Amino acid sequence: MKKHNFSAGPCILPQEVIKKSAEAVLNFNNSNLSLIEISHRSKDFVAVMDNACALALEHLNLQNKGYKALFLQGGASTQFLMAAYNLLEKKAAYLNTGTWSSKALKEAKLFGEVIEVASSKDKNFNYIPKNFNIPSDIDYFHCTSNNTIFGTQINSFPEVNAPLVCDMSSDIFSRELDFSKFDLIYAGAQKNMGPAGTTLVVVKEEILGKVSRNIPSMLDYKIHINSESMFNTPSVFAVYVSMLTLDWLKNLGGISAIEKINNKKADTIYTEIDRNPLFKGFAQKEDRSKMNATFTLVEGANQELFDGLWKAAGISGINGHRSVGGYRASMYNALPLESVQVLVEVMKEFERKS
Ligand SMILES: *Cc1c(COP(=O)(O)O)cnc(C)c1O
């Protein structure tokens, strides 16, 4: 039976990407060798890394603008400390919009003074704070573009007179933005780009080299730039699959094309959440995420009935995160509109049978 995969991460990838990846594991580029048993410094794999980096910059419209793309390891969680290690000399400002922001903020405190400019913790992170003040004497400002767990997303990024650093793990390549406003973008692959095991980092080179501390090699962006993401053995499989997904996105028409589909998916689910009397949305309307829709049943609704219905329809991965409860429908780039329509049909059927 066809599965409708709403998993929050690791999550759905395009079927053709999975198929091509499986083929490359058996026989890479007709070499009669597996992708995962050849040197990362072989000509064929270096071409994969180059292509993946080039495609990432192309999608973000950041070619020839002083940016470098890197594929590193350690997940987005390592970027929480790596960003601070490389950029925090005295003081940084953080916007706290959820679990991931909080973790990033905690790591940065190991390196200097950290100002929390605003937090939505007072309402269990169901909104994006607005109208906060950002101090002018900071080394950088950090925010999280999409809050995977709580289902909120930043629509309007603040103007800052300092480098703008953004964790885009769960919405990179999903919507058009002026990416040149950002100086450092990072994203774990496993939400919208590939399998777990690699993290995309896009950094404007001119912001580096300004802190006085010594940086261990593996945590130094400059070292990774100079060795073109090959300072040590990169996560070859994860980089390859990411490259295929970026290529898939390009063939589809890029971010502008996928954004239209993503808007349709989000509109489809939120329309039903708002219409159906048995459900209520978790995030405040104006800050709703187009990637992760969070919702709960109203009091007294028959949870067993709903859970039985979506499971029978082949839906998978919509249980909410433990800090929100209820349900979370993650609708990353590779999730077809049809899957969202199936979920909405199930929500309607639930209403009829309740
Ligand atoms: C999943 C996620 C992370 C953590 O990523 P890891 O690769 O597991 O370290 C960080 N930030 C956001 C926004 C996420 O969604």
Image: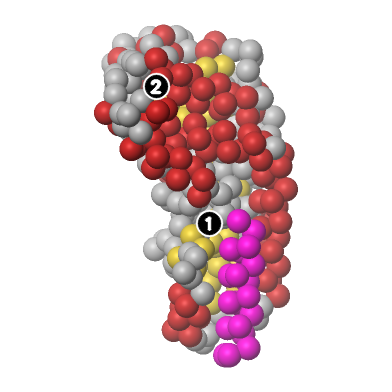
The amino acid sitting under disc 1 is Ser
Q: In x, y percent, where is residue 179? A: 64, 28
Main SS category, magenta section:
helix
Q: In x, y percent, where is residue 234? A: 33, 25
Residue at the spot of label 1: 330
Does the closest atom of ligand 1 sit within 8 Å of the Cβ of label 1? no
Residue 274 picture quarter: bottom right
Which secondary structure lies at badge 2?
Answer: helix
Report the residue at 63% width, 52% height from top.
290
The correct choice, above or below, for 323 with respect to 61 in the image is: below
Observer-nearest of 15 and 107: 15
Q: Is residue 328 left or right of residue 66?
A: left
| Mark 2 or mark 1, earlier in chain | 2
Residue at the spot of label 2: 45
Observer-nearest of 99 and 56: 56
**First to last magenta residue range:** 336-354
Any part of residue 328 in sight: no
The correct choice, above or below, for 167 with respect to 344 in the image is: above
Q: Is residue 317 left or right of residue 294?
A: left
The amino acid sitting under disc 2 is Phe
